[in-house]
Amino acid sequence: MLKSAEDIKVYSHNDCDGISSGAILSSLLDRLDKEHEIEFISLDKLKDLKINNELTIFSDLGSGQSIDKISTSSSRILVLDHHPPLRSLNYNSKLSGRFLEINPLFYGIDGSYEISGGGMCYLLAKKFGFYNLSWIGVLSAVGDMQNTRTGKLEGINKSILQDATNHGLVDSAADLSIYGRQTRPLIIALSYFSDVTLPITNNKTEVILLLKKLGIDRRCDNRLRTLSDLTSDEKTRLFSELVKLLSREVPEKYIKYVPKLVTGDYYEFLNEEEKTPLRDASEFSTAVNACSRNKNPEVALDILKGDRVLAMDELERLTRKHRQYLAEKIRMIEDNELIVPLNNLQYFHGHGIKSEVVGTITGMVLSHGDWRKPIIGFSHVDNGEDLLKVSLRCSRLLAYDGIHFGHIIRKIASKVGGSGGGHAVACGAYIPSKNQDEFLKIFNSTLKGIIN
Ligand SMILES: [Mn+2]
């Protein structure tokens, strides 16, 4: 399919996984000397596409959309996705070679934790021998939060990681799971730590006291230390202290999960400079998201493909802008006390928050409300239609306890004329604005007896 095509269009999802997918495919096509165009889109735009290339590839999306309806007799379609498929495996054969959908779920492989969209694209590149794209497969899995169930990559993701370590591209080991390993000063990183509200949460003074008590310096060589600067002794002390703080705060049934909240593997890209956000997979994925959320996924694509001269400055500008925007909106939610508690959930209406970032912000304000309940953020989709973007985030403890909000939100969204889905602890939906109250009512009553 790939070898015979001369005129190729790639549509990929506009999130970290999708942009990484696009970068792998585009690098592959470059190396095969294939003319191609690439476009990053959001899921709601798929139904309006016109197909007019010889070969169209959909990556990190397509399986959940009726793209077979927009296909034409003169075009071929390849879908590389890991989301729940609408069609069955034998649908492929009905369209006699014009439509090929490859999805791990057809083969009983979990698409949430075992392989990402970028992973699917890497497997294709691997067929052509391009093992050195494996690091992007690792980035996409982390960007897609596939390591959140156990704190490490599992299944096929693990074998992609193995390719990357074998080729000297990635280093990985167990560590504390505190975001910002390379660049975020420890005193800030710790104040953002955990999905449970602790005395140190959003409180730098408490963090400083804590570090003093543990005998951990917060500075070295005239700069603030980050997690990657700590010795293993210091990490052990910090680990025990965090476990102690968390165990004091969570209900008894959650105590067994506490060590899982504090540990996780890191993934370091060895070709990136140390102490830069591109060195650490989680921080890299934030940078990719900053590009995408500012409607500039091409900058991230350039960086991933190695065209860095102009893109690095742009990346820095976008990351700074992204951070400022988030801080400003979180302050707005705080100052106006926008978080409304219901019995089993809490929500806010993010007046004016861009729908692309409402998910990130929802996650960041979880610790400002009641971490025992999920938090839902609403924002209007900017193309006018009376559509609301809904984002839900919750503590990982709820997922360890067996709740999967991605499944719950999908059901409830479809009941009110919308659609949704996603991960256990981070998911979203689009619903008609007029049905917001009904959505909240159903959601709140569905969770009765499940939360607490
Ligand atoms: Mn994905």
Image (cartoon, rainbow, N blue to C red):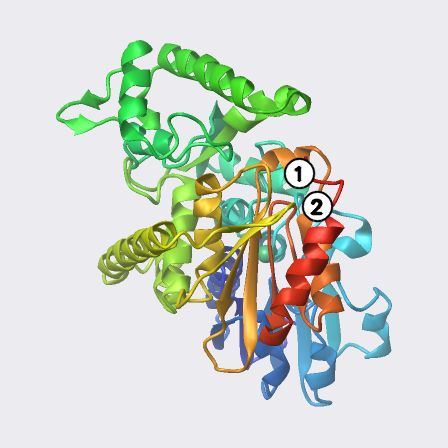
Q: Is the residue under label 1 in contact with that under label 2 (CB below 8 Å)?
A: yes
Relative to 178, residue 370 above or below: below
Q: Which mark is residue 38?
A: none
From the top left corner, tell me how far across and down residue 233 is, in percent: 38, 10
Image position, residue 385 (x, y; %): 54, 82
Which residue carries the number 1 mark? Answer: 399
Q: Secondary structure at mark 1?
A: helix
Dividing the image into 4 quarters, which one contains the C terminus?
Answer: top right
Crowding at dot 1, Cα within 10 Å, few <14 / some 14-19 / many 20+, comes out as: some
Q: Quadrant of residue 300?
A: bottom left
**Which of the two residues, 8 or 282, is positioned nearer the viewer here?**
282
Disc 2 target residue: 404
Quarter of the figure with the N terminus: bottom right
Q: Residue at x 55, y 18 (%)?
A: 247
Report the residue at 47% width, 77% height from top. 37
Amino acid residing under circle 2: His
Front position in the image: 252 or 111? 252
Q: Position of residue 129 (x, y in %)?
A: 57, 52
Q: Is residue 417 above or below residue 154?
A: below
Residue 181 seen: no
